[in-house]
Image (cartoon, rainbow, N blue to C red):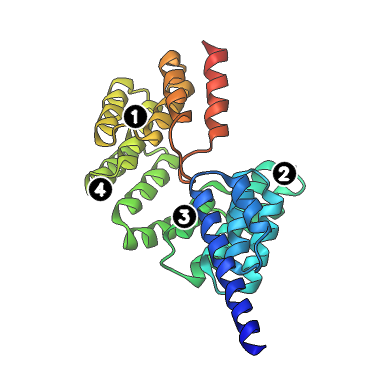
Amino acid sequence: MRGLITLLLALTCLYGQVSLKQAEELYQRTDYKASLALLRDASQHTGAVYCLMGQDYFMLGEYKKATDSFEKALSLEPSNSVYAHWLGRAFGRRAETSGPFTAPMNASKARQYFERAVALDPSNEEALNDLFDYYLQAPGFLGGGYDRAEQIAARIAQQNEAEGHFAQAQLADKRKQFDTAEEQLRRAMDLAPKQVGRVIDLARYLAKRGRFEESEAAFDRAEALAPGAPKVYFARARTYIEHKRHLDKAKDLLVKYLHSDLTPDDPPREEAEKLLRQATGAS
């Protein structure tokens, strides 16, 4: 009998591992509903299961359910920096989408969990980046501030020099030091010449400064560096729409984007569809 019980327990554990792996594969293919359905039927709800459920809810825009799931994951593994970071992200989105009475509370919770994630793992680069963004964007009464952002930017640079220059570029832009911002973006690109995102950052900034020919050249460089990359399609289309230029090209790029194989690291299809409606209405 003991042997049978041991076998059943082993099979249950194995089934749980298989279900989580399958759910992760579905998540990577952006099939968040199917991933979530599989996780709900999982035999064991571990921290990893709750975290992936939270990610699925997050990607589906159900931020309250996302925070509930991430809280459960963190309660099971309170020293897990990744779980704390995702919980901060979910509260951040709740702050962005909630009313004026609840937004400050949700924003403060986002900051607290970003800070906790960094304290738990100082090498968590994504948590550092989100904490930097929070300090850069949030008003002082919610714990934001350029001085705090600058301190985090220095920590980012210690781990990733190119990312550190990108953070300094954002600070310079906020301070209206536009030449410095451009210089920092170019230094980031020079340090990581094969990272298409660095070229996109510069292309978008040049467009923001009204230097459209230089922006076009940078986008051409990005496309040559990563032919057929969905992120290039999306960034170029969004830039065109923001500046009300080349709207027909923007629509073509968004259609290509929507037909691409996307990952969770790419902007959601819903954002691309929204931009496509804007381009269609403006043209």
Q: Secondary structure at mark 2?
A: loop
Front one among 164 and 13: 13
Q: Is residue 112 visible?
A: no
Q: CA distance from mark 4 to mark 1?
A: 19 Å
Q: Earlier in the sequence, mark 3 or mark 1?
A: 3
Q: Horizontal placement of 196 versus 74: left or right?
A: left
Query: In this view, which residue lies farthest toward the top?
Result: 283
Q: Which mark is residue 206?
A: 1
For the residue carrying disc 1, how many other residues have a C-alpha within 10 Å: few (<14), some (14-19), or many (20+)? some
Which residue is pictured at 48% across the width and 49% down the height? 28
Q: Amino acid at mark 2?
A: Ser
- Provide the residue designation for mark 3: 149
Which residue is pictured at 46% across the width and 25% down the height? 254
Q: Secondary structure at mark 1?
A: helix
Q: Secondary structure at mark 4?
A: loop
Q: Earlier in the sequence, mark 4 or mark 2?
A: 2
Q: Amino acid at mark 3?
A: Ala
Q: Which mark is residue 98?
A: 2
